[in-house]
Amino acid sequence: MLPVGDTAQSGDKVLVKRGEHKGIRGRIEDVTRDGIAVRLDMGKQVVLKQEDITNYSLAARRAWTAMPDRAVGRPKLPETARKKTVSLRIDVEVWRELGEAVNQDLIPSREYAVNMWLREQVNLLLNRPDKHDATSE
């Protein structure tokens, strides 16, 4: 037996998979014993079989109920290696040359180099000894 909400519902967004209206999108208006009444985007109402449509709304509902209990995106870093996403405007030529340095194995990554050099300059600016090991950044 299907869980509640695991069937086509009025208002669901669908795509016709086969037949005369193949490739046309629409919304379910009603679900009956005879089939699924769909109002196509072009305005026409048709009755189709469940297997003749792709139900995007139903797929989304199923995905939400099956979603694993974890945060999306990258795994959380340990406290010692926390990062913050920021946006920087870097000269195109500098970015290209950093990429060249990566390709020549002079630095492990652009991110590593920027973090290392910023850390060095912040330490100089604040007049303190090197507080963080750049290899962890």
Image (cartoon, rainbow, N blue to C red):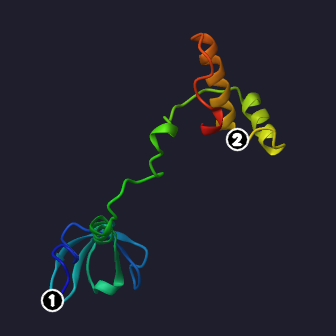
| Crowding at mark 2 (Cα within 10 Å: few <14, some 14-19, many 20+) | some
- Please tell me which of labels 1 and 2 falls first in the chain: 1
> Marks 1 and 2, Cα distance to the nearest angstrom?
60 Å
Q: Is residue 60 left or right of residue 137?
A: left
Q: Is residue 42 left or right of residue 117?
A: left
Identify the image quadrant of the C terminus: top right
Instruction: Using the image, determine if residue 36 lies above or below residue 64.
Output: below
Image location of residue 26, percent across then percent down:
31, 69
At horizontal 43% and vertical 74% (from top left) the residue drawn is 23
Q: Which mark is residue 109?
A: 2
At horizontal 40% and vertical 83% (from top left) the residue drawn is 20
Inspect the image, locate mark 2, and give the three-letter code of the amino acid beneath it: Ser
Q: Which mark is residue 137?
A: none
Mark 1 and 2 residues: CB-CB less than 8 Å, in contact? no
Q: Is residue 115 left or right of residue 58?
A: right
The answer to whether one can see residue 4 in this image is: yes
In the rendered image, which residue does mark 1 sit on? 33
> Can you tell which quarter of the image residue 72 is in?
bottom left
